[in-house]
Image (cartoon, helix red, strand yellow):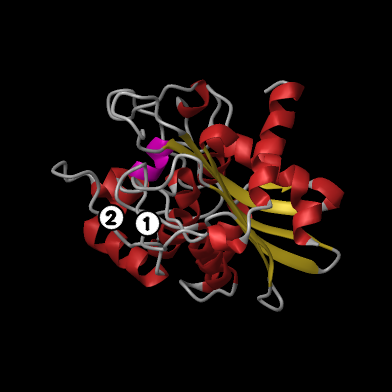
Amino acid sequence: MDRRQFAGTLLGIGAALALPRSASASASASASAAPDAVRAVVVQDWASGRVLHRAGPCAARLSPCSSFKVPLALMGFDAGVLHDAHHPAWDYDPKRHQASRAVDKQRTDPTQWEANSVVWFSQQLTRRLGEAKFKAYVDRFGYGNRDVRGNPGKHDGLTQSWLTSSLAISPDEQVAFLRRMLAHQLVSPRAHALTEAIVPMFVGADSWRVRGKTGSGSLEASVPGAARPALGWFVGWAEKAGRRVLFAAAGTGAAIPTGLAGGPVTRDAFLAQIGRLAG
């Protein structure tokens, strides 16, 4: 992204951050029904639970896309499918795994999986969990609408439900999930610690140390045959001078320049503004 595109993205998402709280949509909105220009950010203080910033339709549900790798890591470590930050390392198999990026076509361990957002690793993990255990974890976590059926008639929920399909979650719900996770309320203490350690780390504005996961996808087109609006997530937590905040940022449509993945765009815009948003 060049400087002009990035500045435009900041303006687009920044304008959305100023939306009044009344702009929130119903929490019952589905991933496919979300409006084309949803842009929402919520930032919450960890110690007090006080909402520091909330703007845009933070109750509108969207597909989690690769932001779902955070709960997937919890599941994997708790179930013993994943062992530690670097084990197991699974080989890419072109006969079984779909991949288009060079970074996807290599042996991948849990840390690389999160950092490079490798979809086939997620799918291999859920296959090893199995449908019953996968569904049970999603229910236990209270994750969004808890719908892991996948695409209608395809019976692909185990490998596709979080990828612009049936599973949907709002920014408000992302933060609620993160609060339960960081309070170690969901699975074993070891699984919590291992998951937190592999969530990618970044440095935000004003020296905030950030751990967060992106997610990139698309929404349904408003008109049949039209281009599908891009979707981007960045969710996680940030720390500075003894403070911790939780956050979820979602950008779609005009907030994301054509041809760019929504997750990294949303991440970079949020990191540039975290000092202001966290207060």
Instruction: In the rendered view, tell whether residue 229 sits above or below residue 42.
Output: above
Q: Secondary structure at mark 2?
A: loop
- Please provide the residue range marked out in magenta: 119-123
The chief SS type of the magenta part is helix
Identified at 47% across, 61% down, the residue is 74
Q: Nearer the viewer, residue 113 or 145?
A: 145
Residue 29, disc: 1
- Residue at position x 17%, y 46% from top? 155
Badge 1 density bin: few <14, some 14–19, many ≥20, Cα 10 Å: some
| Residue of label 2 | 148
Task: Specify the amino acid type for callout 1.
Answer: Ala
In the picture, residue 165 is in which quadrant? top left
User: In the image, is 30 to the left or to the right of 257?
Assistant: left
Q: Which residue is nearer to you in this view: 29 or 93?
A: 29
Q: Which numbered disc flags the more N-terminal residue, 1 or 2?
A: 1
Q: Which amino acid does the dot numbered 2 rest on?
A: Val
Tell me where residue 91 sits by quadrant: top left
**Whether residue 162 is situated above or below residue 26 in the rendered picture:** above
Magenta residue check for 181? no
Q: Is residue 265 above or below residue 188?
A: above
Residue 258's spot in the image, x, y percent? Answer: 54, 23
Q: Secondary structure at mark 1?
A: loop
How many other residues sit within 10 Å of disc 2, few (<14), some (14-19) or many (≥20)?
many
Q: Position of residue 206 (x, y in %)?
A: 86, 50
Q: Nearer the viewer, mark 1 or mark 2?
A: 1
